[in-house]
Image (cartoon, rainbow, N blue to C red):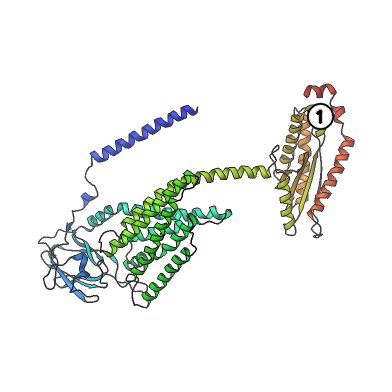
Amino acid sequence: MEHKKRTFFILYLIMAISITGIVAWLALRYQGPDTIQACFSEPVPFDTGWRNETNEPVILNRLAESDSVTPYQQFSIYHTLPDTIAKDTAFCFRSKNIYYQVYIDGRLVYNPYVPESIFYPKSLGTRWNYITLSPEDAGRQLELRITTVYKSARTGLSNVYLGSPGSVILDTLQSKTVALITCILLLFVGLLLMFADIPINMQAKKNHELLYLGLFAVSIAIWCLTETNLLQLFWGDSRLISFISCSSLMLIPIPMVLYLDSAFGFRKNFVIPLISILSITGFAVCMVLHLLDIADIHETLNITHVVLGISALILLYTITKNSLIKGKNTAKNIYRILRGIGLSCISIATGIDIVRFYLGSTGDSAMFVRIGLLIFIICYGTSSLEKTINAVKLGIQTEFVSQLAYRDGLTGIGNRTAFQEHLVNLEKQKEELPSIGIIMFDVNDLKFVNDHMGHQAGDSLLIHSATLIRDAFQDLNCDCYRIGGDEFSILLSGEDVKQRCDLGLKQFRQLIAECNRTAELPFRISIAYGYALYDATSPEKKLMDTYQQADLNMYENKKWLKAHQTRMEDLYSETTTKLTK
């Protein structure tokens, strides 16, 4: 059967690969027109030909670098609209860290909403703008009155088009689809790691490696998501998103260094306090300067970048050093190296993106970090596969060992260890429970069955006895144990314990009578029993006293059974026992 299953699986793989190949070939070979794009006209770039008040050309994405531009002083740039403007045409652009108004022939046509709060940065951050034009605006002068806030290379305008807002938005979404999916994936993985940490650490030794890694991934994912500049399409408060973008960077170093210590360990005890204190101090300084309106959270990014840079260097050093250490376990070394490669990619990517930021890159400022983190997730997932498999194996082994520790190997019910632990727990809770009952059982004639019918028959007698006891009490909310060779016990607690004991023993007697009457067993089943109830009016007494009283009552019943039942020697003839044996 296994050979057939393997054959079917191979055939299934051939089917799946064939379908995948056909789909890929068709998708690449026969690409039809974009249905959604066909609904919109193609946008026309409108980012050249702009001039300032002295008729000098300006570079829109580097406005703050012009010598004539001073922060908080308004200036204007101009352009002439085309001679013909189609219906539903809009002036579309993305603004970065500026204030602005749009005029047509001196008439104000657009003034963006500016929410106010002490927590907001000084600028509007990044914002997408779509100003509707009419055919009457053709040939008129378009004016942007701009106020810069920062003397920064990342100040100005980009993605400037004339066309349908729908087509511009669609182009933007298509160009950033991979970035958006990657960010959402990283965010999901980070949250998943954080939640996975909860059950893992509930009973095990506390090692919050997954929690720290999850926080690290979530912090980076949030920053990368804001840097795609897509959230501004769905959330009107661009200043809030700018605050999130700058502040989320501050949340990266601490979980990163805590994760490194949990995963690899630092030989130097000062590393965690150093990074943590640097990060917390940097956060406090940036927030104080921000709230006092001395320098906002964007202007103090260099402090955050310094802390990130130091953390990235420590990360790279730690990974390199631990990757070079060879252990006896080759598999563990491979997985350690894989994780090291992933984390190294994050470290190097962080440095590259910080450099790109200060060089004034107008592209996606989180591009390399996102790629690095994606590589890390792949490497970490691969390295965690063996760990997960081992954890599952260990869990199965632990469960099996637990079963051996608390289950009787012959009858499958609780053993003496489980009985004693339950008794100890009931002793601690006895004052809070309405009543506690202990029933003792002793299987008669086990020695006779072993001697005359064999130990296999003796084991069968014990198994049938355990089954009868368990079945009689199974609906009465109690626990059944084998506490000796031929001794069993039932523990009951809670309400109506005496009534439950009486009902269970009544069912027990009926089951024994029915079994001896109808079952085709080579022996008679005879089990003595006795029970006692814990007296709640005498809390000074121990449950062990109740246990001993139940044992005494059981032996009284055993004497009665011996006096009134036919002896096994008389019940079974010598010929019968020999044949059975």
Question: Residue at horizontal 34%, vertical 55%?
Answer: 370
Picture coordinates of residue 26, whole percent (x, y):
26, 38
Q: Quadrant of residue 202?
A: bottom right
Res 264 seen here = yes
Is the residue marked by circle 1 packed among few (<14), some (14-19), or many (20+) residues within 10 Å?
Answer: few
Question: Residue at horizontal 81%, vertical 35%?
Answer: 526
Q: Nearer the viewer, residue 108 or 544?
A: 544
Q: Quadrant of the C terminus?
A: top right
Above or below residue 374? Residue 304 is below
Res 111 seen here = no
Question: Residue at horizontal 75%, vertical 30%?
Answer: 457
Q: Quadrant of residue 157?
A: bottom left
**How many discs mark residues in the rendered view?**
1
Picture coordinates of residue 225, whole percent (x, y):
35, 58
Q: Nearer the viewer, residue 500 or 535?
A: 535
Above or below residue 576? Residue 347 is below
Q: Quadrant of residue 343?
A: bottom left
Query: Is 178 left, or right, of 442 in this rendering?
Result: left
Asked which secondary structure carries label 1, the reply is: helix
Q: Which residue is mark 1?
A: 451
Question: Residue at horizontal 81%, vertical 23%?
Answer: 578
Query: Is 503 left, or right, of 110 in this rendering?
Result: right
Picture coordinates of residue 226, whole percent (x, y):
34, 61
Mark 1: which amino acid? Answer: Asp
Query: Is 33 left, or right, of 84 in this rendering?
Result: right
Picture coordinates of residue 219, whole percent (x, y):
40, 60
